[in-house]
Amino acid sequence: QVQLVESGGGLVQAGGSLRLSCAASGSGFSINTMGWYRQAPGKQRELVAIIISSSNTNYADSVKGRFTISRDNAKNTVYLQMSSLKPEDIAVYYCYAAGFLDPGRPFHSWGQGTRVTVSS
């Protein structure tokens, strides 16, 4: 199995920045896709940003221009740099990864979530 551990959430004032990190651990795996989803209170989980391989990225319209996703393949880690944070960004942010376990079995994993709170 592949385990994902997030870090970097917390409380920030509106207009501030936070950087989320998510590290994947395990053995015998390769990751193709990593990303971030979020779930606000009373709402469904939604895609925030995703990165496929090393550079193919996709963002939710609501975060374009404010959030940047990146990954370090050597460390099996994905990052989400969040800037110009708004109260509507308040949510629990979940890391996601998908790829293959040796010998070629597909997997997808979720992290436990990290809470982001934005004060207005």
Image (cartoon, helix red, strand yellow):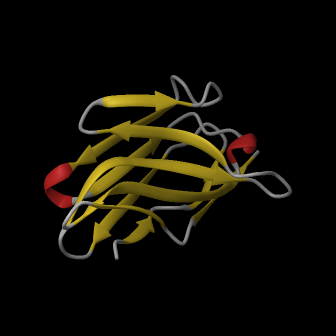
- Image position, residue 33 (x, y; %): 36, 46
Q: Residue at x 38, y 58 (%)?
A: 21
- Image position, residue 79 (x, y; %): 36, 49
- Image position, residue 116 (x, y; %): 62, 57
| Along the line of sight, the residue nearer the viewer: 116 or 39 | 39
Q: Residue at x 40, y 56 (%)?
A: 97
| Along the line of sight, the residue nearer the viewer: 65 or 120 | 65
Count the marks: how many? Answer: 0
| Along the line of sight, the residue nearer the viewer: 48 or 1 | 1
Q: Looking at the image, which residue sits at the far right?
A: 42
Q: Looking at the image, which residue sits at the far left?
A: 74
| Along the line of sight, the residue nearer the viewer: 28 or 88 | 28
Name above or below for residue 9 compared with residue 120: below
Q: Residue at x 50, y 44 (%)?
A: 17
Q: Residue at x 34, y 72 (%)?
A: 2
Which quarter of the picture shows residue 81? top left
